[in-house]
Image (tube, helix red, strand yellow):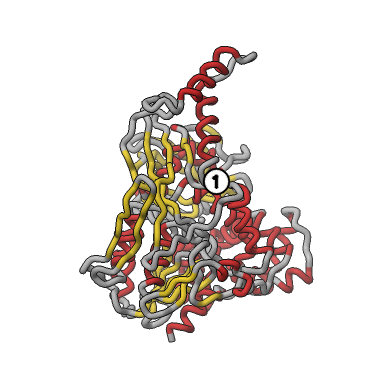
Amino acid sequence: MINRPKFYVYLPIVFALILILGIFIGNTFHLDNSKGIISSNHSGKYTKIDEILKYVYEEYVDTIKQDKLVDKTIVAMLQQLDPHSAYITKDEIADMNEPLQGNFEGIGVEFNIVNDTIRVVNAIPGGPAEKVGVMGGDKVILVDGKKMAGVKITNKGVMEKLKGKGGTKVKVTMMRRGKKELLDFTITRGTIPIHSIDVAYMVSAKTGYIKISRFAATTYDEYMEAFKKLQNKGMVQLIVDLRGNGGGYLNTAVSIADEFLTDGKEIVYTQGKARPRKDYKATATGDFEHGKLMVLIDDGSASASEILSGALQDNDRAMIIGRRSFGKGLVQEQSEFADSSAIRLTIARYYTPTGRCIQKSYANGVNAYYDEEYARYTNGEMENADSMKVKDSIKFRTPMGKVVYGGGGITPDVFVPMDTAGHSHYLTEVLYAGLLNDFAFEYADKNRKNLNAYKTVEKYNKEFEVSSSLLDDFVAYAEKNKVPRKEKQIKASSSVLKNELKALIARTIWSSDGYYPVLQNEDNVLKKAIQLMK
């Protein structure tokens, strides 16, 4: 979900995503447990809860649903502990686990909803939809005979129709540009991978770049595949981008850290009241233990991202670049119950090799905890390193004597302020309305033949330019969609608008492999890392 240049435009979205990811995706350990919470009465300490629930259920003035009351009671109780202990109902658990499992079952398409019509952006290579001939640009008209166009369909509605158990069939009727007749496809649903490596490419002749969006069950294998691909292209130094990465499995972060650290180096350790200290150390294996390494972070980098960046910073292995990370240093253990619901309970804190616990304070409650993210924006921290209050917290020293800080996220070695150039209310409006995305998709779909003639993303990025006339076409399109023309603001944001359009057009043709290299033409954090590599 993040990580774009002109980051200010996406702040509200990022804050919302961090809220969701922070609660449901953290350092997760699975524990088999079939015991319910309310029925646990072995010590006699929870009898009052049982009695109150029973009393309310039997005597309350109106009929109530006991299951819902129990769920709400558990949620309220856990919220009093910390911001990351959470209860997950049986209806929510599959959606919460999918990103960490690394796959789901469906037909395998990336889609947009444009003008109340489902448009296929790309059919996932090797997926069920691609195998039967579905192509980017196809419009979904019917699903199992039910009309899908012009019915105010939502993303959730699309997923409900197209996702399903592997082996089941769904009939999808498509409209394709240049074809007079509708096309019918019977697609057998299958397992679709959820990739956690967004993109991997060479940013210079010697420097590779890998962007990791989460630490899932499949992330290490994906990373190794991407690493070897770049190594074969001549990579001798590496930039790892963890911006916007809300975390995931601790063991995955440890495995990737092991690729960079020599045998015996501390990666992280965990400790809690009922959990003795557990150390995670690097092994003798590792394919990039000595090359120049830089890691990009921001306030959306949390949990497992902070484990990896903290381990590399504390061992003097990598330069950390960007802005201060989120500050989640609590470890959750997942226990599942007989009704398929689950609890993620904080059972320990994790500590970086120098002994830092980078968990930020939650003493003032959950709301204040998450509002702290926005406070960084308002107090100037996003633009000025001197505004970081963490500077006053406990100091630690790395083996080479570098000062690092605990008490609230990973503080970067090199601070890069948020780029506010080109910001305007007009830019915010068209981004939030999704108009840039819709316009770019329509343009790319109409011009696929010409765009495919570029052959490679590199050639496209070098030669294709969003002209002033194309930008004017977009402004007219936005006007038709109730975003009025604002000449001064459009002029101020023109370079951002053009680069966004160029990147989104590339995404329609080349997916993420086209999107990120173009988008990052104006990414100041990445530019700083490339500069420092030299």
Say how many tags the image has: 1
Q: What residue lies at 40% left-to-right and 50% top-to-bottom? A: 348
Q: Position of residue 144 (x, y in %)?
A: 47, 33
Dot 1 amino acid type: Ile
Q: Position of residue 257 (x, y in %)?
A: 33, 65
Q: What residue lies at 34% left-to-right and 49% top-to-bottom? A: 131
Residue on which disc 1 sits: 118
Q: Quadrant of residue 30?
A: top left
User: Outermost residue toward the left?
Assistant: 284
Looking at the image, can residue 448 be seen? no
User: Outermost residue toward the bottom?
Assistant: 534
Rendered position, 69 above or below 220: above
Rendered position, 15 above or below 474: above
Q: Mark 1, residues whose alpha carbon is within 10 Å: few (<14), some, or many (≥20)?
A: many
Q: What residue lies at 27% left-to-right and 66% top-to-bottom? A: 282
- Viewer-nearest residue: 239 or 301: 301
- Viewer-nearest residue: 292 or 347: 347
Asked which secondary structure carries label 1, the reply is: strand
Q: Position of residue 397 (x, y in %)?
A: 42, 74
Q: What residue lies at 49% left-to-right and 47% top-to-bottom? A: 84
Question: If the image is split into quadrants, where does the C terminus sit?
Answer: bottom left
Looking at the image, can residue 150 be seen? yes
Q: Would residue 518 appear left or right of 493 to someone viewing this image?
A: left
Q: Position of residue 206 (x, y in %)?
A: 36, 82
Q: Would residue 96 appear left or right of 4 to someone viewing this image?
A: left
Q: Quadrant of residue 329?
A: bottom left
Rendered position, 265 above or below 336: below
Q: Quadrant of residue 209?
A: bottom left
